[in-house]
Image (cartoon, rainbow, N blue to C red):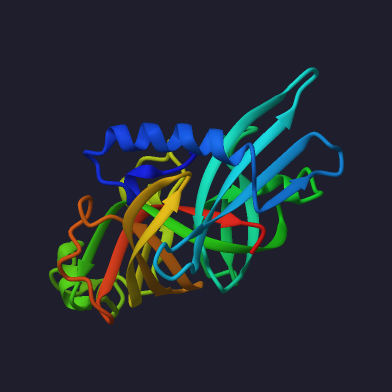
Amino acid sequence: MPVHFNSFIADNEEKLKTNLFSNIVTEYTQKADDIFVSDDKKSIHMESYIKESNTNEIVGKVIVTLKVRADALEIVDTDITIKNDNSTMLLFEKKLKQSSESNEYYDVSFEDNYHFQIETVNRYRLKQDNIENTNQKVFLSAFPFQLDLYDDENEMNKALGFESPIKLGNLDIHVNGFSTSMMSSTGVMTGKFDEPASFVIGNIEDYKDVTVNIANINIDFTIIYIETAIGILPVATHRANFDLSKLQNGSILAMLADIKADFKE
């Protein structure tokens, strides 16, 4: 999917979303902080930094992807990522059928233990046409569709259906609930596999409200940093779209989200 505005722009701001998308296309195809042209000269990535208005700190970036056609340039994708200072090495196991020239989706794994799904950003920076069964260093950020906050593991597991430990078959073993390092594809939780996404649980390490200017439009939203099985993951949210009343360091966040995998820091 392209820019996932519904994570960090209020649901009732439809005009803002329309104007923002139009401005991104207009502004960031005329100028950019970084321009990358693929070796075959058929793909172009134009990247522009998103900065916090008060501190000038870089909090993310906008990426516009263009393809060189026979007689013109064509925009095939626009995307936004949140800055992550930490890289993650993932095994790209399988390219998903929902992939296209604009967006590629993969089943990935981390250290053979955690399996989930991602959407690639800056895909054409890589020289390989096929990256299945290869390890790639990426910078991850998340844009949730659904998000819940819990004070502790007991509250979380009750909400997710674990009222009490569940006996494992005929064994004298009981399952107490979900771990705070749980990661999987969304389909495992919902039974719907038509839209690639991931289910992620993590402990909140930090958060901040930011005001940014994207393509000459001021936007306020909240970035939540959670400690997950794959390290720190920044999550883009808006207080009008999600109940963040329990937002505090140490609480637990569980979400269904689109995880962007950026190949460039």
Task: Classify residue 42 by image quadrant.
Answer: top right
Where residue 98 sits: x, y (%)? 54, 35
Where residue 200 sits: x, y (%)? 38, 62
Task: Report the front residue among 103 and 184.
Answer: 103
- Residue at x-position 75% and y-position 48%: 36
Seen in the picture, residue 64 relative to 54 is either above or below; the reply is above
Identify the image quadrant of the C terminus.
Answer: bottom right
Residue 32 shown left or right of residue 224 in the figure? right
Q: Is residue 231 visible?
A: yes
Residue 63 shown left or right of residue 135 in the figure? left
Task: Report the front residue among 68 and 185.
Answer: 68
Residue 167 shown left or right of residue 144 in the figure? left
- Residue at x-position 46% and y-position 31%: 22
Q: Is residue 99 visible?
A: no
Where residue 204 sits: x, y (%)? 32, 76
Residue 63 shown left or right of residue 147 in the figure? right
Task: Report the front residue among 20 and 161.
Answer: 20
Task: Classify residue 14 by image quadrant.
Answer: top left
